[in-house]
Amino acid sequence: SPSDPDLVERARKAKEKLGDKVFVLGHHYQRDEVIQFADVTGDSFKLARDAAARPEAEYIVFCGVHFMAESADILTSDDQKVVLPDLAAGCSMADMATAEQVAECWDVLTEAGIAEQVVPVSYMNSSADIKAFTGKHGGTICTSSNAKRALDWAFEQGEKVLFLPDQHLGRNTAVRDMGMSLEDCVVYNPHRPNGGLTADELRAAKMILWRGHCSVHGRFSLESVNDVRERIPGVNVLVHPECKHEVVAAADYVGSTEYIIKALEAAPAGSKWAIGTELNLVRRLANRFAPEGKEIVFLDKTVCFCSTMNRIDLPHLVWALESLAEGNLVNRIEVDKETEAFAKLALERMLALP
Ligand code: 13P
Ligand code: SF4
């Protein structure tokens, strides 16, 4: 739907008034009405780097979800303020690993006698607390665009990896990109005593996967892949690695949001694509590439938007920008100093990956 012209004008004016004092970052899953005001768009990795590269901006307005704004705060200087236009824009996956649960897991690994061999690798989609745990225990952060490099690095540091919180990204990277087998992976369930695993199972595993998932990507199924191949002969199936292993195994291409965009930019006219990722991005790409004769469809029509990404809408963005323009700092995301120090260690290890 087209955005309200009055709100568009107000956002434009507030941004103009703020000038270089504000820098607006937009994740690819954001609504069109919000993306039009982003100074840069990107995947989680690119946005983390771009936030860190703007020391002159007093305000970083993050159009994305809470863990992204936290990461931006960690990577920017203390006098820069990160603003999330709606504080309810969280991430259900990040919520699946709490600091208490992860500390308990580490105790279980210690009791099984393997903690010293384990390197934690945490997906960007996690709270600052989890990133701090990761930094404290010698681990790194990864995103969907560098998960293989992060795992290569981790297996140089230790024999086993605790991958959290997305079991699918962990399994897909281990099996698809690193040549491990499904048997090398076990799933740690934080809601069961000892994670639902015996000490022997933990000792035998190479990848200990946290039992978390994305509520959006987890809904694409093998049937959606088979259906679309039947409906559209010659279709290329391209999915995000947060999808289940069976979906990724059946797809033709797998990658982060930035990868998906590049793949479609490079695709020849007349090619057909079914995309398994968030709907705002798929729609935008379908509209953008239709004039070039590229047919792009959503992999499964029963899957919907990421509801928390969608919380950042134009009214919230206008409110945040106008407040800042009037000198009111609203919705600041600020990670406490101790958490920040350890989380930064883990994020910097990611940024230093080859
Ligand atoms: P990327 O943009 O890094 O692919 O992340 C996808 C995602 O789910 C962000 O929430
Ligand atoms: Fe979280 Fe999934 Fe939404 Fe990304 S798409 S913010 S992982 S719930």
Image (cartoon, rainbow, N blue to C red):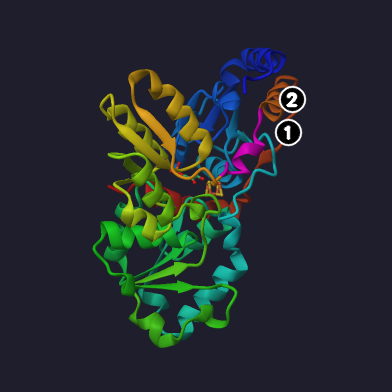
Question: Considering only order in the chain, which callout, 2 or 1, is on the residue closer to the N terminus?
Answer: 2
Principal SS element in the magenta part? loop
Q: Point out residue 246 in the picture as x, y percentages from the top left corner.
A: 37, 60
Image quadrant for the N terminus? top right
Task: Identify whether 301 is placed above or below 50.
Answer: below
The boundaries of the magenta stretch are 304-313
Q: Point out residue 91 in the picture as x, y percentages from the top left corner.
A: 59, 50
Task: Determine if the magenta segment contains residue 306.
Answer: yes
Q: Residue under circle 1?
A: 330
Q: Say which residue appears at 46% left-offset and 79% top-offset.
A: 109
Contact flag, marks 1 and 2 (Cβ < 8 Å): yes
* Mark pair 1, 2: CA separation: 7 Å
Give the amino acid at mark 1: Val
Q: Secondary structure under badge 2?
A: helix
Q: Residue under circle 2?
A: 323
Q: Say which residue appears at 41% left-offset and 63% top-offset.
A: 138
Task: Identify whether 201 is placed above or below 191.
Answer: below
Beta carbon of the mark 2 residue lies under 8 A of ligand 2:
no
Task: Identify whether 258 is placed above or below 33.
Answer: below
Q: Point out residue 295 in the picture as x, y percentages from the top left corner.
A: 37, 29
Mark 2, Cα crowd under 10 Å, few <14 / some 14-19 / many 20+, is some
Give the amino acid at mark 2: Ser
Q: Say which residue appears at 53% left-offset and 82% top-offset.
A: 194
